[in-house]
């Protein structure tokens, strides 16, 4: 193993450690109130060292968002793999989305609620290429859902995907910590799938 390989692995591990330190701070304090010195302190790094890995708070936050979307995309793709009929694929997608919300709450909240809670300040801080990357990842998620809805008229599909995406996010946000989440999730899934495939 060469020195370059070892350094790359060490840098990757350090970046992951920084992200793990930053994630709960963003969730607790929000984007605006979280500072790089706070993240450095939790990561047990000198602030100057932190800046070697992430030149700004927004660069760090953008990587958290990308990481969350990549995990969600991977789960959605695995959920539909091998499922034949569109209805079975749609059911698997709903289940995977809700499971992601429950099993990865930090990523879920980072993706769906911090930007909304912070208003425009966090979104405006993102560079155009960062926003474009996030939109691209979100569109990958939604395009997976859209392919399941080929039976709907083409003009209805975008609105149907947005409606399902929003309903599932709201359900997960309000009921994820509730002891009845599994039952509520099953009922939501039944209603959604029945409604989407009733026609």
Image: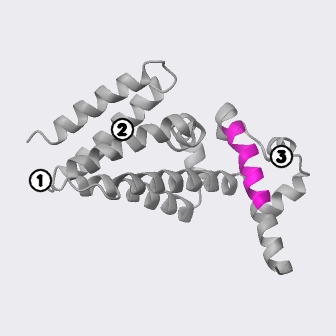
Image quarter (top left, top right, bottom left or bottom right) of the C terminus: top left
Q: Residue furthest right?
A: 46
Q: Secondary structure at mark 1?
A: loop
* 151 and 103: which is toward the camera: 103
Q: Residue furthest left?
A: 199
Q: Secondary structure at mark 2?
A: helix
Q: Mark 2 = which residue?
A: 166
Q: Mark 1 = which residue?
A: 153
Main SS, magenta region, reads: helix
Q: Secondary structure at mark 3?
A: loop
Residue 64 in the figure: left or right of residue 12: left
Which x, y percent locates residue 102? 51, 34
Query: Considering only order in the chain, which callout, 1 or 2, is on the residue closer to the N terminus?
Result: 1
Write the start and end of the magenta stretch as one range.
Answer: 13-26
Q: Residue at x 48, y 27 (%)?
A: 176
Which x, y percent locates residue 84? 23, 56
Asked which quadrant contains residue 150, the reply is bottom left
Category of crowding for the residue at label 2, using alpha-carbon neighbours closer than 10 angstroms: few (below 14), some (14–19), many (at least 20): few
């Amino acid at each position: 193993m060469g020195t370059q390989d070892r350094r790359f692995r060490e840098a990757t591990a350090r970046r992951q450690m920084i992200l793990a330190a930053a994630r709960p701070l963003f969730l607790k304090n929000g984007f605006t109130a979280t500072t790089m010195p706070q993240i450095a302190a939790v990561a047990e790094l000198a602030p100057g060292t932190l800046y070697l890995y992430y030149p700004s708070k927004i660069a760090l936050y953008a990587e958290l968002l990308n990481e969350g979307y990549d995990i969600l995309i991977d789960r959605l793709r695995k959920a539909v793999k091998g499922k034949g009929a569109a209805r079975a694929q749609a059911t698997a997608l709903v289940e995977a989305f809700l499971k992601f919300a429950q099993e990865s709450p930090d990523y879920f909240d980072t993706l769906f609620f911090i930007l909304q809670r912070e208003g425009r300040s966090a979104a405006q801080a993102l560079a155009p290429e960062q926003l474009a990357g996030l939109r691209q990842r979100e569109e990958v998620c939604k395009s997976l859902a859209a392919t399941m809805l080929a039976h709907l008229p083409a003009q209805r599909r975008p609105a149907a995907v947005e409606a399902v995406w929003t309903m599932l996010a709201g359900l997960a946000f309000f009921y994820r910590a509730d002891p009845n989440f599994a039952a509520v999730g099953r009922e939501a899934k039944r209603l959604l799938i029945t409604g989407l495939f009733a026609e």
